[in-house]
Image (cartoon, rainbow, N blue to C red):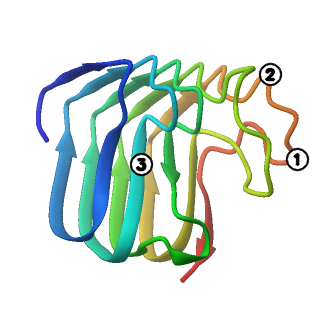
Amino acid sequence: MLGNHINQGTLAIHGPALDVRVRDNRIEDASGHGISLRGEGVVAFVDIHRNQIVRAVGNGIGFDGGDFGPIAVDITIAHNQIVDCVGANARPGAMPAGGIVLARVAELRCATTASSRTAARQRSPSAGSTCTAAGA
Protein backbone atom coordinates (compact mmCIF):
# COMPACT_ATOMS: atom_id res chain seq x y z
CA MET A 1 0.00 0.00 0.00
CA LEU A 2 1.99 2.97 -1.25
CA GLY A 3 1.13 6.66 -1.60
CA ASN A 4 -2.63 6.62 -0.93
CA HIS A 5 -4.97 9.08 0.78
CA ILE A 6 -7.51 7.28 2.97
CA ASN A 7 -10.29 9.41 4.44
CA GLN A 8 -12.61 7.93 7.13
CA GLY A 9 -11.21 4.44 6.76
CA THR A 10 -8.67 2.10 8.31
CA LEU A 11 -5.72 0.57 6.51
CA ALA A 12 -6.05 -3.06 7.65
CA ILE A 13 -3.34 -5.72 7.42
CA HIS A 14 -5.15 -9.07 7.71
CA GLY A 15 -3.29 -12.17 8.84
CA PRO A 16 -1.96 -14.37 7.49
CA ALA A 17 0.22 -11.93 5.55
CA LEU A 18 3.90 -11.86 4.57
CA ASP A 19 6.16 -9.11 3.24
CA VAL A 20 3.82 -6.12 3.61
CA ARG A 21 4.88 -2.56 2.76
CA VAL A 22 2.82 0.39 4.03
CA ARG A 23 4.58 3.59 2.95
CA ASP A 24 3.86 7.24 2.19
CA ASN A 25 0.13 7.10 2.93
CA ARG A 26 -2.10 9.75 4.54
CA ILE A 27 -4.81 8.24 6.73
CA GLU A 28 -7.26 10.63 8.37
CA ASP A 29 -10.47 10.49 10.42
CA ALA A 30 -10.45 6.68 10.80
CA SER A 31 -13.34 5.34 12.90
CA GLY A 32 -10.94 2.80 14.48
CA HIS A 33 -7.14 2.52 14.36
CA GLY A 34 -5.36 4.33 11.51
CA ILE A 35 -3.40 1.18 10.63
CA SER A 36 -4.68 -2.09 12.08
CA LEU A 37 -3.11 -5.55 12.33
CA ARG A 38 -5.99 -8.06 12.46
CA GLY A 39 -7.20 -11.49 11.47
CA GLU A 40 -5.61 -14.81 12.41
CA GLY A 41 -2.29 -16.49 11.79
CA VAL A 42 1.03 -14.72 11.34
CA VAL A 43 1.69 -11.23 10.01
CA ALA A 44 5.40 -11.11 9.22
CA PHE A 45 7.99 -8.88 7.59
CA VAL A 46 5.90 -5.70 7.81
CA ASP A 47 7.42 -2.32 6.96
CA ILE A 48 5.39 0.77 8.02
CA HIS A 49 7.27 3.93 6.95
CA ARG A 50 6.59 7.64 6.32
CA ASN A 51 2.82 7.55 6.89
CA GLN A 52 0.73 10.43 8.24
CA ILE A 53 -2.04 9.23 10.56
CA VAL A 54 -4.37 12.01 11.70
CA ARG A 55 -7.46 12.01 13.96
CA ALA A 56 -8.02 8.23 14.20
CA VAL A 57 -10.60 7.42 16.88
CA GLY A 58 -8.44 4.45 17.93
CA ASN A 59 -4.65 4.13 18.13
CA GLY A 60 -2.51 5.46 15.31
CA ILE A 61 -1.19 1.94 14.71
CA GLY A 62 -3.01 -0.79 16.64
CA PHE A 63 -3.96 -4.41 17.03
CA ASP A 64 -7.48 -5.84 16.62
CA GLY A 65 -8.38 -9.39 17.43
CA GLY A 66 -8.42 -10.03 21.16
CA ASP A 67 -6.84 -13.32 22.17
CA PHE A 68 -7.11 -14.76 18.66
CA GLY A 69 -5.60 -11.97 16.58
CA PRO A 70 -2.47 -12.32 14.49
CA ILE A 71 0.99 -13.00 15.80
CA ALA A 72 3.23 -10.25 14.41
CA VAL A 73 6.86 -11.07 13.62
CA ASP A 74 9.60 -8.78 12.28
CA ILE A 75 7.76 -5.46 12.23
CA THR A 76 9.49 -2.15 11.45
CA ILE A 77 7.67 1.12 12.21
CA ALA A 78 9.65 4.26 11.40
CA HIS A 79 9.38 7.91 10.29
CA ASN A 80 5.60 8.12 10.72
CA GLN A 81 3.60 11.11 11.98
CA ILE A 82 0.72 10.22 14.31
CA VAL A 83 -1.39 13.23 15.35
CA ASP A 84 -4.65 13.66 17.34
CA CYS A 85 -5.45 9.94 17.63
CA VAL A 86 -7.38 8.17 20.43
CA GLY A 87 -10.19 10.70 20.47
CA ALA A 88 -12.92 11.34 23.02
CA ASN A 89 -15.03 8.60 21.43
CA ALA A 90 -12.37 5.88 21.75
CA ARG A 91 -13.63 2.55 23.02
CA PRO A 92 -12.77 1.99 26.68
CA GLY A 93 -11.19 -1.35 27.49
CA ALA A 94 -8.28 -3.27 28.90
CA MET A 95 -5.86 -2.52 26.05
CA PRO A 96 -3.68 0.58 26.43
CA ALA A 97 -4.24 3.53 24.13
CA GLY A 98 -1.68 5.65 22.33
CA GLY A 99 0.20 6.34 19.13
CA ILE A 100 1.39 2.75 18.57
CA VAL A 101 -0.09 -0.13 20.59
CA LEU A 102 0.46 -3.73 19.51
CA ALA A 103 0.10 -7.18 21.11
CA ARG A 104 1.57 -10.62 20.36
CA VAL A 105 4.71 -9.17 18.74
CA ALA A 106 8.21 -10.55 18.24
CA GLU A 107 11.07 -8.54 16.70
CA LEU A 108 9.52 -5.07 16.73
CA ARG A 109 11.60 -2.05 15.69
CA CYS A 110 10.22 1.48 16.28
CA ALA A 111 12.29 4.49 15.25
CA THR A 112 11.72 8.21 14.88
CA THR A 113 7.94 8.10 14.84
CA ALA A 114 6.46 11.42 15.98
CA SER A 115 3.27 11.24 18.05
CA SER A 116 1.61 14.48 19.13
CA ARG A 117 -1.65 15.37 20.82
CA THR A 118 -2.41 11.65 20.80
CA ALA A 119 -4.50 10.25 23.64
CA ALA A 120 -4.85 13.67 25.26
CA ARG A 121 -8.55 13.05 25.86
CA GLN A 122 -8.35 9.31 26.65
CA ARG A 123 -8.51 8.20 30.30
CA SER A 124 -6.02 5.37 30.08
CA PRO A 125 -3.00 4.70 32.30
CA SER A 126 -0.80 4.46 29.22
CA ALA A 127 -2.32 7.36 27.28
CA GLY A 128 0.28 9.04 25.13
CA SER A 129 2.47 5.97 24.68
CA THR A 130 4.55 6.19 21.56
CA CYS A 131 5.33 2.48 21.27
CA THR A 132 3.81 -0.19 23.51
CA ALA A 133 3.95 -3.89 22.71
CA ALA A 134 3.10 -7.10 24.52
CA GLY A 135 5.10 -10.23 23.67
CA ALA A 136 3.92 -13.01 21.37
Q: Which residue is mark 2?
A: 121
Residue 113, position in %: x, y? 46, 39
Return the mark for residue 125: 1
Q: Which residue is mark 3?
A: 36
Q: Residue at x 75, y 20 (%)?
A: 88
Task: Give SS at disc 3.
Answer: strand
Q: Nearer the viewer, residue 98 or 11?
A: 11
Kind of residue sitting beneath label 3: Ser
Task: Give SS at disc 1.
Answer: loop
Kind of residue sitting beneath label 2: Arg
Q: Nearer the viewer, residue 87 or 26?
A: 87
| 11 in relation to 47, above or below | above
Kind of residue sitting beneath label 1: Pro
Residue 30, position in %: x, y? 45, 25
Marks 2 and 3: in contact by CB < 8 Å? Answer: no
Residue 40, position in %: x, y? 38, 74
Q: Quadrant of the C terminus?
A: bottom right
Q: Residue at x 35, y 66 (%)?
A: 75
Q: Nearer the viewer, residue 31 or 127?
A: 31
Q: CA distance from mark 3 to mark 2?
A: 21 Å
Count of numbered circles in the view = 3
Q: CA distance from mark 3 to mark 1?
A: 21 Å
